[in-house]
Amino acid sequence: MVLVPLRNIAERMFPPRALYIDFPLGLPLGRSLDADFQHRVLDAAFKLLENTAGPVLEDFPEAVTAETSQQLVCSLPPRYDPNLQPAVDEAQGLRRAYDRAVAINGRTSVGEYASADEIPGQLDKFARIAAGEPWDEVGFLAPTYRVAQDIRAYYEELASELADGPADPLSIESWFYEQTEAGSILLAARHKMQEADAPFLEWFLITPESRGQK
């Protein structure tokens, strides 16, 4: 029995028992600190075990969106080099905040496919895709969605250093896709790749499904 935040993936993989949860990635039980809501999710998931045959894919009836979270106040640095692509300039300007976050936390999840040093260059590749360059000619050495995960992790970790107040996963997601140049570039690149009939996983997992809708 699994909780799946991406329904299209579950439809392709046919897990024996799956509950589709329309929640942001990183929140498998939905609302943070809401025990009643989380228990409803678990009850719905375990109820799937009552089915004697599978595969079973059912939808949890309640959705959770970034709009249900408090707006994150997170100041971004001013442009430093107007000759650089805005997302690249932004990522470079945020490096000190990222380094402070790593020093405080003593760890980072960035670097599996793109290190912190490589994030600006990877964003430049996504910007080229968004501008119309073929996605398979910009020089990615790993799946595009894997690189996008490192970019998002870079921003999620530094957000705690920039935020004026608590930074929960929903508010960070909203901030990233609605206020940063990097988030805008990933959305634009996803749409371009979809229009170009790129392989499904290459474009679909670049952003959460709810953020990728046109």
Image (cartoon, rainbow, N blue to C red):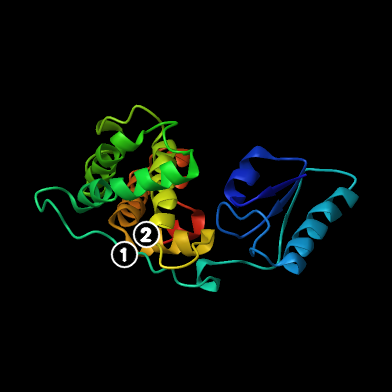
Q: Counting other residues with Cα less than 10 Å from the Cα at mark 1, is it few (<14), some (14-19), or many (20 or more)?
A: few
The disc label shown at residue 199, or none = none
Name the residue that disc number 2 marks. Answer: 162
Q: Residue furthest left?
A: 83
Query: In the rendered structure, are the residues bearing label 2 and label 1 in contact, judged by CB atoms less than 8 Å apart?
Result: yes
Q: Earlier in the sequence, mark 2 or mark 1?
A: 1
Q: Secondary structure at mark 2?
A: helix
The disc label shown at residue 75, or none = 1
Task: Give x and y (percent) for residue 153.
Answer: 44, 45
Identify which amino acid the numbered label 2 is placed on.
Leu
Q: Relative to 140, is 64 on the left or the right? A: right
Residue at image coords 14%, 47%? 84
Residue at image coords 39%, 51%? 158
Image quadrant holding the N terminus, namely top right
Task: Give x and y (percent) for residue 109.
Answer: 48, 38
Q: Secondary structure at mark 1?
A: loop
Residue at image coords 61%, 51%? 7
